[in-house]
Amino acid sequence: MARLKRPSLTRRRLLTAGAGVLGAAAATGAYAAAIEPLELTVTRYALTPPGWRPDHKLTITAIADLHAGGPDMTLPHVRRVVDTAQALQSDLVVLLGDFKAWYRHFKSEPVADDVWAGELARLDAPLGVWAILGNHDWWHDLSGVRAALAAMRIPVLENDAVLIGPAGRRFWLAGLGDQLAYQLGHGRYRGIDDLPATLRRVQTDDPIVLLAHEPDIFPIVPDRVTLTLAGHTHGGQIRLPFIWPHFVPSSYGARFAYGHIVEERRHIIVSGGLGTSIVPARFGVPPEIVHITLGA
């Protein structure tokens, strides 16, 4: 039997292979920077977690990590997010923090506070539109974000809880203060989150829906809380195989990076969010609005 000759690695072959790799990388980078960040999906969850009455149907629209600002969250995109969210006609809308874009090494076109907040003010739901603040709100323009939301009469829950809903179908909506509010340097932070104080605001045995910008609080959330909603991770933002879990902004790596997670009968849904941070690119986790049906 004739032996096949193994192809030799010539300079031409090496250059051709290298060009192919670089071309693929360039195409991936272009998609991640210019295409996927401008997409918009609605991700739906239907569940009846422990503590929630099966006959109590409640719909929630969750908007996380808007990061309004260019190049990927310009005014038309913000407007499309609001239009899509409003079309869902949910009973409740929650805004999970990080309202403005900020990039250290990339020039960003800002969207003025009164503009992005004015768009969010178009949201309407029978049980209201409620917000919490995220780490970028605290780090980069806390007073501006607070003022913008206040001007549009969007209440911010900060280590607080409110009882909402009609008689027989009431539940507590609790909002946690940000867990990374103060940057102390060298990867250290001090939060203003106070979970015990937040839960002390709950005065009845009605179910609790907890809003927390970062999902890292979840391991100590008691099973008294029916459902936790979080954002912050962007679902990893750039999901390159074998690499992305190391860059999820969480002390738990990929454990709470994205989606519906159940641990010891406790439920959390982590949104992949809408905008970007650090770099204006997304890959493998397109921008999303989350729609949740409880009592489904």
Image (tube, grey):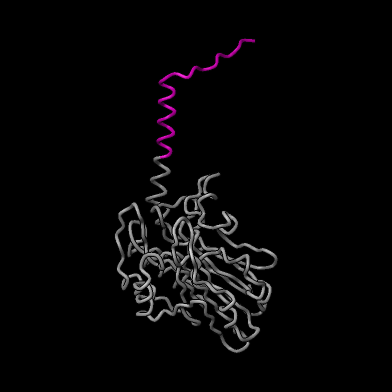
In the depicted view, which residue is nearer to us: 289 or 203? 203
- Does any portion of residue 151 appear in the rendered image? yes
- Horizontally, residue 225 falls left or right of residue 130, namely right
Quadrant of residue 255 within the rendered picture: bottom right
- Horizontally, residue 205 falls left or right of residue 146, namely right
Quadrant of residue 109 within the rendered picture: bottom left
Quadrant of residue 168 within the rendered picture: bottom right
In the image, the segment drawn in magenta is 1-25
Residue 161's place in the image compared with 36, above or below, is: below
Q: Does the segment drawn in magenta span residue 201? A: no
Pick the quarter of the image with the N terminus. Answer: top right
Residue in the image at 57% along x and 54% along y: 254
Q: Does the segment drawn in magenta span residue 20? A: yes
Residue 156's place in the image compared with 271, above or below, is: below
The percent position of residue 195, horizontal first and vertical second, equals: 57, 74
Residue in the image at 59% along x and 76% along y: 196
Pick the quarter of the image with the C terminus. Answer: bottom right
- Does any portion of residue 91 appear in the rendered image? no
The percent position of residue 54, horizontal first and vertical second, equals: 67, 77
